[in-house]
Image (cartoon, rainbow, N blue to C red):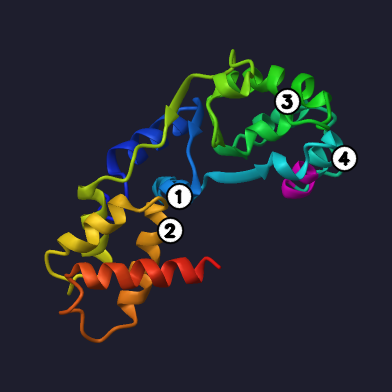
Amino acid sequence: MKSTHLLRPVFTERTWQKLAGGAALHIQGTKALGLERLLSDVKSLSRTATIWMELDLAEFGRDVQSLFSAWARAFSMEVAPTDFREFVGVLKANGVATTLVIRNLGAAVTEGADPNFHTKLFEQLNVANLIPQIGLLTIDSKSMAELELADTWLHEEKRLPPLGFRRIQEELERKLPELKTPVAIVSGVFAHPQPFPFLEYVINEGQLQTDLSGWNSQAQVDRLIEGFAKSEG
């Protein structure tokens, strides 16, 4: 059955297919382009039995053991693992399809980060590649080359695609079907420096209205841009 709710249908479906097959992927993207929406859409395609586990390295960059303790709590382990290999062994023993999402990959190499991150995490990520039921997705605003990280464990690296006219219009048609041929709105979102957050703002504002007949104008786009800027503080 075709998934009609996806913001980036082809990119999202391919991402999930690879993760479901146990691939290790890195996606370079930002909130402004809708990175969180991508993750939400990918999850919506997954099997209900799949365990999703998300970890933000920005929270653990100075204390590697805290990272393993967080894993232990998430999987109800009596004793926290001492390295990534031991953790993956627990996942393998469970035999349950698992997708690990590691956010802010670059936090592991920022000044003051625990040097054990490289030895205990990155150099052992290839262990996950040996277990078909484990998919690995790392995300950051920078590419692997920009982060200067070893990528021997990586199967594929992708940049989150720009939010194009067609995708913006399709999202508006899904969320604001009464807004007919919103050319001005679509153009305004496309040109905005934060296209996805602005798109969400437009949709939220539109859903509060009882009449959208006057929205297909540049004047309305300007009002929305001003309102969004104020909402961002």
What distance separates the C-alpha of mark 3 from that of mark 2? 32 Å
Residue placed most toward the observer, 151 or 155:
151
Residue placed most toward the observer, 191 or 57:
191
The residue sitting at 23% across, 63% down in the picture is 185
Q: Are marks 1 and 2 in contact (CB under 8 Å)?
A: yes
Q: Which residue, given by chain and number where applicable, does mark 2 sit on?
A: 197
Q: Earlier in the sequence, mark 1 or mark 2?
A: 1
Say what secondary structure mark 2 lies in.
Answer: helix
Q: Position of residue 75 (x, y in %)?
A: 73, 46
The dot on residue 32 is: 1
Nearer the viewer's eye, disc 3 or disc 2? 2
Q: Is residue 46 above or below residue 140?
A: below
What distance separates the C-alpha of mark 1 from that of mark 4? 39 Å
The dot on residue 79 is: 4
Q: Earlier in the sequence, mark 4 or mark 2?
A: 4
Q: Earlier in the sequence, mark 1 or mark 4?
A: 1
What distance separates the C-alpha of mark 4 from that of mark 2? 41 Å
Q: Which residue, given by chain and number where applicable, does mark 3 sit on?
A: 121
Within 10 Å of disc 4 (Cα), the crowding (few <14, some 14-19, many 20+) is few
Residue placed most toward the observer, 35 or 24:
35
The residue sitting at 40% across, 34% down in the picture is 15
Q: Are marks 4 and 3 in contact (CB under 8 Å)?
A: no
